[in-house]
Image: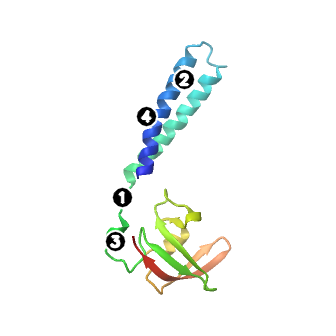
């Protein structure tokens, strides 16, 4: 939520006013049809307005959840760090986070990702099947931790 709010504030308070100033200056130079500053500025302003709308809608829908307050720590829910093992006993550790926070290289998977959907509500020892592009794979939940 903080990252979305910071991006929204930056766009609204810094980038958009700069673009408005450039467009105003370019519009005062005369012929707008061949004025690159004017055309680019208008295009960039539309992009900023579209992103501001998207961020605004996302922030209205979001709910900040503290994983440390999770009452049922025996099951995998939002914010849980889950250790899973496949048939070859190869283990991976993933943390279930919001879709805006996901980063697969850091082991953070979005709440609506196929693996995260399969792990929701799982307990240690549960087997979960996940459909992947290469086929279906079975994972066993080895450990669940919360911050």
Q: Which of marks 1 and 2 is nearer the N terminus?
A: 2
- Please provide percent x and percent y for residue 3: 45, 50
Residue corresponding to mark 4:
13
Q: What residue is at 52 percent from the left and 61 percent from the top?
A: 102
**Real-space Cα separation, disc 3 to disc 2, in angstroms:** 49 Å
Report the disc number at residue 46.
none
For label 1, the SS is loop
Q: Which of marks 3 and 1 is nearer the N terminus?
A: 1
Q: Do the residues labelled 3 and 2 touch (CB within 8 Å)?
A: no
Q: Which of marks 4 and 3 is nearer the N terminus?
A: 4
Q: Do the residues labelled 1 and 4 touch (CB within 8 Å)?
A: no
Q: What residue is at 64 percent from the left and 19 percent from the top?
A: 33
Tell me the crowding category of disc 3: few under 14, some 14 to 19, or many 20 or more residues within 10 angstroms, Cα based: some
The quadrant holding residue 76 is bottom left
The quadrant holding residue 53 is top left
Q: Are marks 4 and 2 in contact (CB under 8 Å)?
A: no
**Real-space Cα separation, disc 4 to disc 2, in angstroms:** 15 Å
- Please provide percent x and percent y for residue 28: 55, 14
The quadrant holding residue 63 is bottom left
Q: Which of marks 3 and 2 is nearer the N terminus?
A: 2
**Relative to 132, residue 6 above or below:** above
**Real-space Cα separation, disc 3 to disc 1, in angstroms:** 13 Å
Is 5 positioned to the left or the right of 88 in the image? left
Q: Earlier in the sequence, mark 1 or mark 4?
A: 4
Residue corresponding to mark 1:
64
For label 3, the SS is loop
Report the disc number at residue 70.
3
Q: Do the residues labelled 1 and 2 touch (CB within 8 Å)?
A: no
**Real-space Cα separation, disc 1 to disc 2, in angstroms:** 37 Å
Q: What residue is at 47 percent from the left and 38 percent from the top?
A: 11
Residue corresponding to mark 2:
22
Q: Inspect this view and state whether residue 58 appears.
A: no
């Amino acid at each position: 939520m903080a990252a979305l709010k910071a991006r929204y504030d930056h766009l609204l308070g810094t980038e958009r006013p700069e673009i408005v100033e450039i467009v105003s200056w370019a519009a005062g130079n005369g012929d707008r049809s061949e004025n690159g500053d004017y055309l680019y500025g208008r295009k960039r302003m539309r992009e900023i307005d579209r992103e501001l709308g998207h961020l605004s809608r996302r922030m209205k829908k979001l709910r900040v959840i503290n994983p440390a307050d999770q009452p049922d720590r025996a099951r995998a829910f939002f914010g849980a760090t889950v250790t899973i093992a496949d048939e070859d006993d190869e283990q991976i550790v993933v943390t279930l986070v919001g879709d805006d926070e996901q980063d697969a290289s850091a082991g953070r998977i979005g709440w609506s990702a196929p693996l995260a959907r399969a792990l929701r509500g799982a307990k240690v020892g549960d087997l979960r099947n996940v459909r992947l592009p290469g086929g279906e794979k079975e994972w066993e939940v080895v450990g669940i931790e919360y911050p």
